[in-house]
Amino acid sequence: MKTKLPSIDLIGFEGLGLIIEWPSGVSYTTQSAGYGCEHPQIEGVMVPLFDGVGRPVLHALRQHFRGDWHAIDDKAAKIIDRILKRHDLAFIRADRERLIDSREAWIFVIVDEDRAPNLSPRIEGFGSRSGVLTWPNSD
């Protein structure tokens, strides 16, 4: 029998977050998929991301995703990558193998620690891993 992990719901978190997939014993969830109101979960560790004064990454993502509950496509993944790169977050990129599982406010990503800038927060010891980029759902 599988034991249910302790869970943290990020529904009240108003920022941009990165959940690095990791055997932490803790599961994270939040409302995602716009009007679809899904509640996916992933085991890992959560890192709040500072995306600049005025939250330009968060603003750009919220402008692009407005209530759509369908899986993202390659076009949306390219937009996400461009937004992240423009704001010194190019060490995070949309995971093309998991587009079918990605929704608004819950994007599966590849995190490449070696490409991370020496900015806060420092992410060390994880290597290249899977994760989820998350932000407040548009619903």
Image (cartoon, grey):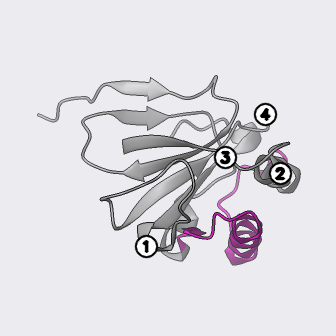
Label 2 element class:
helix
Q: Give how far apart the Cα atoms at labels 4 and 2 are.
A: 20 Å
Marks 4 and 3 in Cβ contact (< 8 Å)? no
**Mark positioned earlier in the residue sequence (4 or 3):** 3
Label 4 sits on what residue type? Asp
x and y, in percent, of residue 57 in the image: 77, 53
**Mark positioned earlier in the residue sequence (4 or 1):** 1
Q: Is residue 128 magenta?
A: no
The span picked out in magenta is 66-95
Residue 122 vs residue 63, the one in the foreground: 122
Q: Quadrant of residue 75?
A: bottom right
Residue 34 vs residue 60, the one in the foreground: 60
Q: Which mark is residue 33?
A: none
**Mark positioned earlier in the residue sequence (1 or 2):** 2
Circle 2 is placed at which residue position? 56
Circle 4 is placed at which residue position? 139
In the figure, 55 relative to 27: above or below?
below
Q: Quadrant of residue 79?
A: bottom right
Q: Which mark is residue 114?
A: 1
Q: Mark 1 against mark 2, which lies toward the viewer?
A: 1
Marks 2 and 3 in Cβ contact (< 8 Å)? no
x and y, in percent, of residue 132 in the image: 51, 53
Label 1 sits on what residue type? Asp
